[in-house]
Amino acid sequence: MEFDIDEMRTTGASGAFLHMPRDRPHGYVNCTNVPARVICVFTPGGCEGFFEEAGEPVGDVAQAVAMLRPADPQRLTSIAARYGMSIIGGLPVS
């Protein structure tokens, strides 16, 4: 996984811990074709509703990979606004 935090690119290997400060531009992308698992902890809580509303539950990894499709930026921007979040652009891919 690659993470952008305040315009600084960091690679997170298995077991890595990264802090993404609140109200700071950040994002992440899996730059491989191997599924990854990420645990996110939010404090204070509340923004997890964004992921619940924007995402789609899947039963297994194969199903998740089969469901991949480009995100709808307008839909995500609308959902983000309900949770006090701003979508400021895509993660640059190198």
Image (cartoon, rainbow, N blue to C red):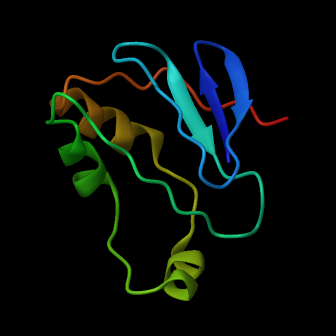
Vertical position of residue 71 compared to residue 20: above or below: below
* Side of 31 where 83 appears, left or right: left
Residue lying farthest to the right in this orientation? 94
- State the quadrant of the C terminus: top right
* Side of 41 where 3 appears, left or right: right
How far from the left and from the top, in percent, is residue 7? 66, 14
Among the 4 quarters of the image, the one containing residue 76: top left
Total numbered badges shown on the rendered structure: 0
Which residue is at 68% across, 48% downward? 1
How far from the left and from the top, in percent, is residue 85? 29, 24
Which residue is at 72% across, 70% downward? 34
Q: Which residue is nearer to you in this view: 69 or 15?
A: 15
How far from the left and from the top, in percent, is residue 49? 18, 46
How far from the left and from the top, in percent, is residue 55? 34, 59
Vertical position of residue 36 compared to residue 91: above or below: below
Q: Which residue is nearer to you in this view: 79 or 39?
A: 39
* Side of 88 where 75 appears, left or right: left
Among the 4 quarters of the image, the one containing residue 62: bottom right
Among the 4 quarters of the image, the one containing residue 29: top right
